Image: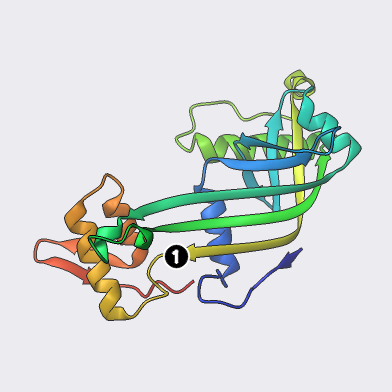
Amino acid sequence: MTFVQLVGVLQIRSFQRVKQFLHEEHVGRISSIDENGYPQIIPMNFVFLDNAIYMHSHTRGEKLDNIGRNNKVGFEADRELEFLPSYFEDPTNASLADTLYISIVIKGSAYLVTDKEEKTLALNGLMEKYQPEGMYDPIKSTMRVLDGVAVIKIVPEILHGKYKIGQHISTKDRIDLAEKILKRNTPSAQTTLKIMGFEVTESGLVMVDEPVW
C-alpha cells in the first residue's frame, strides 16, 4: 500500500490520523464498475483492520458481480465538520461560502474473503466497531452463519487523506473563525471546535492544540 503524502497544506500526513478517522467513521462508499462500464457507488458499513477495509454483504448482488469481473475498486469515507456561511467573510459575496471537512480516498483491489478465520475476524471487528458496548456472543469460525454472509476485503494500493480544520490559515484567523463558529452554534459546532484544537470554557475559547495532521 502506498500512503500518498501529496504536496499541500490540506493533505493528511499522519497515517495514525488516517487510521483513527477510519476507526471512527461509520459509513464508507465502495465504487465498482458495472457490466456497462459505469461506476456503481454504494454506502456501506466497514472496518479498517490490518491495513485493509472489510465490509459485509449479501451473498448475491450487483457489486459482487462487478468485483467478479473487475476487482479494481475505489473507496472513500468523509465527514463534513462545519459549513462556513459566506457572511463569515462578506455579507454580500456568496462565493466565499466554504466547508471544514475530513476525507479519505482509497484505490485498490477487492476480494471475497473465503478463509473462515479471516471472515470471522472481519465480522467480529465490525461488531466491535459498531457495538462497542458488547452484549453479544462473538462469532466463531465454526458457525454456519458464516455461509450466509459475504465479506468483501479491499486491499489499498493508493491511500490519501485531505482535511480542512483551520490549519490552512493563520493563528489569528483561526481564532476568529472559531469564535464565529461558536457564535453560530450549529449542532456540530462543539465537536468541530474540538477537532480544530479549541476547548470551550466558561471564559471563552482556549486553543489547546495545533490542527496539524
Residue at left offset 48%, top offset 27%: 135
Residue 30 position within the rendered picture, expressed as x and y whole percent measured from the top left:
68, 41
The residue depicted at 77 percent of the width and 40 percent of the height is: 32
Relative height, residue 29 to residue 78 (above, below): above
Query: For numbered disc 1, what is the local secondary structure?
Result: strand
| Residue kind at label 1, given as amino acid type | Lys
Q: Position of residue 34 (x, y in %)?
A: 81, 34
Residue ranking furthest to the left: 203
Q: Position of residue 134 (x, y in %)?
A: 49, 32
For the residue pair 76 and 22, the one nearer the viewer reads as: 76
- Neighbor class of circle 1 (other Cα within 10 Å; few <14, some 14-19, many 20+) is many
Q: Quadrant of the N terminus?
A: bottom right
Residue furthest toward the right? 69
Nearer to us in this view, 136 or 184: 184
Relative horizontal placement of residue 72, taking residue 58 as reference (left or right): right
**91 sits to left or right of 63:** left
Describe residue 190's horizontal placement relative to residue 118 as left or right: left
Q: Give x and y (percent) for residue 137.
A: 58, 26
Q: Is residue 37 above or below residue 169?
A: above
The colour scheme used to paint the residues is rainbow
The reply, left or right, for residue 202 in relation to residue 1 is: left
Residue sitting nearer the eye, 63 or 118: 63
Q: Is residue 93 visible?
A: yes
State which quadrant residue 42 falls in: top right
Who's the residue at 49% across and 49% down the image?
Answer: 24
Toward which corner of the image does residue 3 lie, by quadrant?
bottom right
Say which residue label 1 marks. Answer: 164
Q: Residue placed farthest to the front in the image?
A: 92
Q: Is residue 51 visible?
A: no
Q: Residue at (18%, 67%) from the top-left corner?
A: 205
